[in-house]
Image (spheres, rainbow, N blue to C red):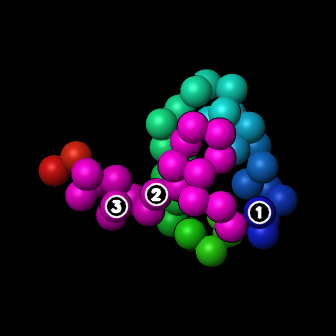
Amino acid sequence: MRDPKDVIYVLTATAGQADAILTGDMRDFIESHYGGARVLSVREFLALHD
């Protein structure tokens, strides 16, 4: 993880068993998944739920 301020979002998503973490800056998330949560841009998320 490139931005330490984003750790709270990963921890929250993991604790809440989220399916996805939505971000406007994909570069901050090195992994494509954290726990069971996929890292998606808002555009990717909307395309999946169109």
Q: Is residue 3 left or right of residue 30?
A: right
The residues bearing labels 2 and 1 have C-alpha atoms spaced at a distance of 15 Å
Tell whether position 35 is magenta: yes
The residue at the point 78 percent across, 49 percent down is 7
From the top left corner, tell me how far across and down residue 44 is, in percent.
34, 61
> Which portion, as a residue range, is magenta?
30-48
Picture quarter with the N terminus: bottom right
Disc number at residue 31?
Answer: none
From the top left corner, tell me how far across and down residue 48 is, in percent.
25, 51
Q: Which residue is mark 3?
A: 44
Q: Which residue is mark 2?
A: 40
Above or below, comparing residue 16 to residue 47 in the picture: above
Q: Which residue is mark 1?
A: 1
The residue at the point 24 percent across, 58 percent down is 47
The residue at the point 44 percent across, 62 percent down is 41
From the top left corner, tell me how far across and down residue 30 is, in percent.
68, 67
Per the image, label 2 sits on a secondary structure element best described as: strand
Q: Residue furthest bottom?
A: 27
Per the image, label 1 sits on a secondary structure element best described as: loop
Q: Where, by quadrant of the figure, is residue 5 drawn?
A: bottom right
